[in-house]
Amino acid sequence: GIVAISLALECPSATLTAVDLKNGAISVARNNAGRLGASVRFVESDWYSALAGQQFDVIVSNPPYIAAGDPHLAGDGLPFEPLCALTDGGDGLDCIRAIVAGAPAHLASGGWLLFEHGYDQGEASRNLLAAAGFKEAFTHPDLAGIARVSGAHL
């Protein structure tokens, strides 16, 4: 929920909906949002399944994207995170594929999709976006200069 909470605090006039597969994660995020005064609607959902008929101007996500067996799963404080929040158990792109494929049905005309991904997944992410009909796909570096966010618009 940190992405939605941060957006709510930075853009208080925005209407935000955050989804998570795990009710426990939603409880923690809801508590954090309340404590920080962030207005966010939280929904338990497997990506878009609980959002039928809803459209958004922007969809942002920080999905599980680490490939199974990646040595980063054992370091950098990641062992304290639930494994399902880090990896899809495959190549790290399954969740990104689902997000990109489902986004057009939930984005308003001209809407933007932005998502975090692994340091080596920028090209694959841009290809997925282009194949799904998105325009002007790009990858942007994080503050360390590592390619970490890709996006595009309809």
Image (cartoon, helix red, strand yellow):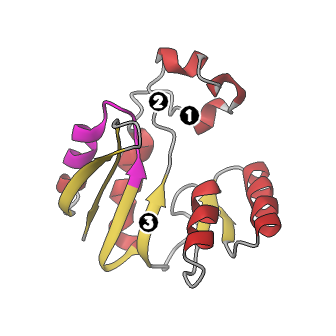
Give the answer, above or below, for where 123 lies relative to 151: above
Q: Is residue 13 left or right of residue 77?
A: left
Q: Is residue 67 left or right of residue 31?
A: left
Sequence-wise, the earlier of marks 3 and 2 is 3
Q: Amino acid at mark 2?
A: Ile
How far across and down, in percent of the image, does residue 84 sit?
61, 35
The tag on residue 86 is 1
Sequence-wise, the earlier of marks 3 and 1 is 3
Quadrant of the frame with the C terminus: bottom left
Q: Nearer the viewer, residue 51 or 71?
A: 71
- Residue underneath mark 2: 66
How far across and down, in percent of the image, does residue 105 sit?
37, 72
Q: Mark 3 to mark 1: distance in Å? A: 19 Å
Q: Quadrant of residue 17?
A: bottom right
How far across and down, in percent of the image, does residue 131 sit?
18, 53
The tag on residue 59 is 3
The answer to whether the residues at label 1 and label 2 have Cβ atoms under 8 Å apart is yes
Question: Which residue is pictured at 46% across the width and 18% down the height?
Answer: 70
Q: Secondary structure at mark 3?
A: strand
Instruction: Characterize the local packing of mark 2: few (<14), some (14-19) or many (20 or more) Cα atoms within 10 angstroms.
Output: many
Give the answer, above or below, for where 96 lies relative to 51: above
Give the answer, above or below, for where 16 lies relative to 95: below
- Assess whether residue 73 is covered by the magenta stretch: no
Q: Is residue 45 visible?
A: no
Q: Amino acid at mark 1?
A: Leu
Instruction: Characterize the local packing of mark 3: few (<14), some (14-19) or many (20 or more) Cα atoms within 10 angstroms.
Output: many
Quadrant of the frame with the N terminus: bottom right
Q: Is residue 120 visible?
A: yes
Question: Which residue is pictured at 23% across the width and 58% down the height?
Answer: 132
Query: Which stretch is magenta?
Result: 115-127
Question: Which residue is pictured at 19% across the width and 46% down the height?
Answer: 127
